[in-house]
Image: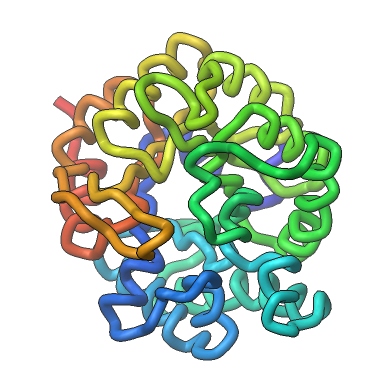
Amino acid sequence: MADNGSGLHAVLERGAVVLDGGLGTRLETRGNDVSSALWSAEILRLRPEEVRAAHRDFFDAGARVATTASYQVSYNGYAQIGVDAEIVDELLVRSVEVAKQARVESGLTGADAWVLASVGPYGASLGNGSEYTGDYDLSEAELTVWHERRLQVLDAASPDALLCETIPSNAEARALRNALGDLATPVILSFTVAEGRLRSGESLAEAVRIAETIPGILAVGVNCSSVADTDRALRIMREASGLPLIAYPNSGEVWDAESRSWSGSASSVASYVPGWRELGVKLIGGCCRVDTAELAAIAAATTQPRS
């Protein structure tokens, strides 16, 4: 398997790696306004030093991965506010550069910490919550075209892996496979799930089979889902594949796209970590509403010796 010099594949063969938490959550905690449809992408454009600081905060809490602020950086999203595609390209590259700078400032190197370039789903660019349904207005071929340029720009920025995340449907998984083509950077696919299936209602086993056909696939798993749904999905995925697994659930709170607010109460992600390690989950962290305190607990549970 190609690893583009990052060594991450070899590290995963030896043990588990601690991911970061919710970048938008950390930015909001730091006093940034992430309520717009562009979310953390606008902080990257206007205050990149805040994104760098947020990455440092997670490194300080025990993360050994920085997930870039490119999740919601899209050409159609920025076109709505008059930002040209060339500027979007620059923002994608900036997201990787800022994460690498934070790694250096945290006293870490490419041998002990990694940068994953976030590739959000089409639904995230719409800002209407459709990444939680997979109900899109594009065909699979159109989705492929939509993803291609962004993937190529992020690949050229030389992250340690491309993290295609919050994928709600098998159609988008296939589109990503097509758009990835023969890019050199390793790939991780992470799906959003509910009740043992993709958000679209489709089969998780089929999602894993699609992931297995991607050259350079590093891991497959779940993000942006409740802790209980994540646990259930991981067990289905483990039965379907021997690939390394990735898990970074939400806190348990629920996002309302219309009011752009969270409701409900948080659950402990860290309490699930010992079971996930036994299951062979190799990349463990948090997504929305998981901040540094919970991430530190996740890191402690992930790095302690297994009994």
**Eyeballing the image, is 179 above or below 20?**
above
Seen at 54% across and 16% down, the residue is: 203
**Eyeballing the image, is 272 above or below 65?**
above
- For the question of whether residue 191 can be seen, the reply is yes
User: Residue 285, image x and y in percent?
Assistant: 33, 48
**Eyeballing the image, is 116 above or below 48?**
above
> Toward the viewer: 79 or 287?
79
Seen at 48% across and 73% down, the residue is: 40
- For the question of whether residue 100 can be seen, the reply is no
Seen at 42% across and 42% down, the residue is: 223
**Eyeballing the image, is 170 above or below 34?**
above
Please identify the residue farthest to the top as the structure is shown. 239
Quadrant of the rendering where the C terminus is positioned: top left
> Toward the viewer: 15 or 127?
127
User: Residue 193, image x and y in percent?
Assistant: 43, 31
Counting every numbered tag in the picture gives 0
User: Residue 85, image x and y in percent?
Assistant: 81, 75
> Toward the viewer: 235 or 18?
235
Seen at 81% across and 57% down, the residue is: 152
Quadrant of the rendering where the N terminus is positioned: top right
Q: Is residue 78 left or right of residue 274?
A: right
Q: Is residue 306 left or right of residue 143?
A: left
Please identify the residue farthest to the front as the structure is shown. 258
Q: Is residue 261 left or right of residue 139?
A: left
User: Residue 88, image x and y in percent?
Assistant: 73, 75
Question: Which quadrant of the view contains residue 306?
Answer: top left
Q: Is residue 241 left or right of residue 273?
A: right
